[in-house]
């Protein structure tokens, strides 16, 4: 019974732990767990349990951790509100002023065994660079970029979760942030495509009608829970769980898989786009290594 209670409690508190891990991954400077724990006046195993969700810190402890990690502004407000909600209710629905969509995405990503995404017009959140992410957020750009990068480190570094991304060609031809930002972004796609748990595929433009032209979506397949389709809108999100509807999106993913370039063809196309953006004179050894974008070019 005690074990069941701990598991249920950990499941309810997962969003706070995931948000803490997002900020932990983005911390500067990269202090050790022991060093930060010492500054907080707790043992390092306690801090580790806050981050893995097996123990919930108090609101005062979260506030102290926010101070140590130098979390400010909107990001700090969201974190403290989530801590307040977790402390009072131990639930994740209706978080006090925090985006319900963001909280639900954290939940789904923590439960998923596979994530499949169709993104016809932009680079998906889970594959964006920090510079690309900042250029696609009109408000609180740094905050949004930090959360995206934190989600990436938690989800994509999990060797048990498989992520498939199908991208439309317009996602590559957009000049988000300018040529240097897009070049860095293409390099990140190439690096991501080399992971054994990540698959990146491009879907050509010159095709007959397919239902993917209706818009992007993400399918979360979960081990012990029904699958969920997430559709993002401007200022809102839709979550579909009816088995018949989910089955239509599975069928659409199978169609996109058949239409998409092979992984090898995708990599070659990405290389071609990268060369067009930055030229062909860059040394081979420099490819796919992190680069600091030059000043944006139109």
Image: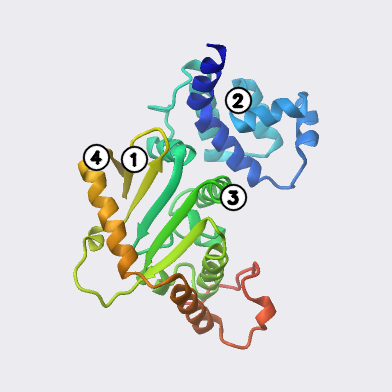
The numbered disc on residue 227 is 1
Residue 213 point in image, percent of width and height:
24, 63
Task: Specify the quadrant of the image occupied by residue 180.
Answer: bottom right
| Res 76 visible | no
Q: Is residue 133 above or below residue 60?
A: below
Q: Residue furthest top?
A: 1
SS for dot 3: loop
- Going from N to C along the chain, the mark reached first, 2 or 4, is 2
- The disc at residue 50 is none
Q: Which residue is mark 4?
A: 243
Is label 2 or label 1 in front?
1
As measured in the structure, the alpha-carbon distance from the residue carrying label 2 to the one carrying label 1 is 25 Å
Mark closer to the observer (2, 4): 4
Using residue 231 as the reference point, say whether residue 140 is left or right of it.
Answer: right
Q: Are marks 2 and 4 in contact (CB under 8 Å)?
A: no
The disc, 3 or 2, on the residue closer to the chain's N-terminal end is 2
Q: Where residue 54 is drawn, which disc sits there? A: 2
Confirm or deny contact between disc 3 and disc 2 (CB under 8 A). no
């Amino acid at each position: 019974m005690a074990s069941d209670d701990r598991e249920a409690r950990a499941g309810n508190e997962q969003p706070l732990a995931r948000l803490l891990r997002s900020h932990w991954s983005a911390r500067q400077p990269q202090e050790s767990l022991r060093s930060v724990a010492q500054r907080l006046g707790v043992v390092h195993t306690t801090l580790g349990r806050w981050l893995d969700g097996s123990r919930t810190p108090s609101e005062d402890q979260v506030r102290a951790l926010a101070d140590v990690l130098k979390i400010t502004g909107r990001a700090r407000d969201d974190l403290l509100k989530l801590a307040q909600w977790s402390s009072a209710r131990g639930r994740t629905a209706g978080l006090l002023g925090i985006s319900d969509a963001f909280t639900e995405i954290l939940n789904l990503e923590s439960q998923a065994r596979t994530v499949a995404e169709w993104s016809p017009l932009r680079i998906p959140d889970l594959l964006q660079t920090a510079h690309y992410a900042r250029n696609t957020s009109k408000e609180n750009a740094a905050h949004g970029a930090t959360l995206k990068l934190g989600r990436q480190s938690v989800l994509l570094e999990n060797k048990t979760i498989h992520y498939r991304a199908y991208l439309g060609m317009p996602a590559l031809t957009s000049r988000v942030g300018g040529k240097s930002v897009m070049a860095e972004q293409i390099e990140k796609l190439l690096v991501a495509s080399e992971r054994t748990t990540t698959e990146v595929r491009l879907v050509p433009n010159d095709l007959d009608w397919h239902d993917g032209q209706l818009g992007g979506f993400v399918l979360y397949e979960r081990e012990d829970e029904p699958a969920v389709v997430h559709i993002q809108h401007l200022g809102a999100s839709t979550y579909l769980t009816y088995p018949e509807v989910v089955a239509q999106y599975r069928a659409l993913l199978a169609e996109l898989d058949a239409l998409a370039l092979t992984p090898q063809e995708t990599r070659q196309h990405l290389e071609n786009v990268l060369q067009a953006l930055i030229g062909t004179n860059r040394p081979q050894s420099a490819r796919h290594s992190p680069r600091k974008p030059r000043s944006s070019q139109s």
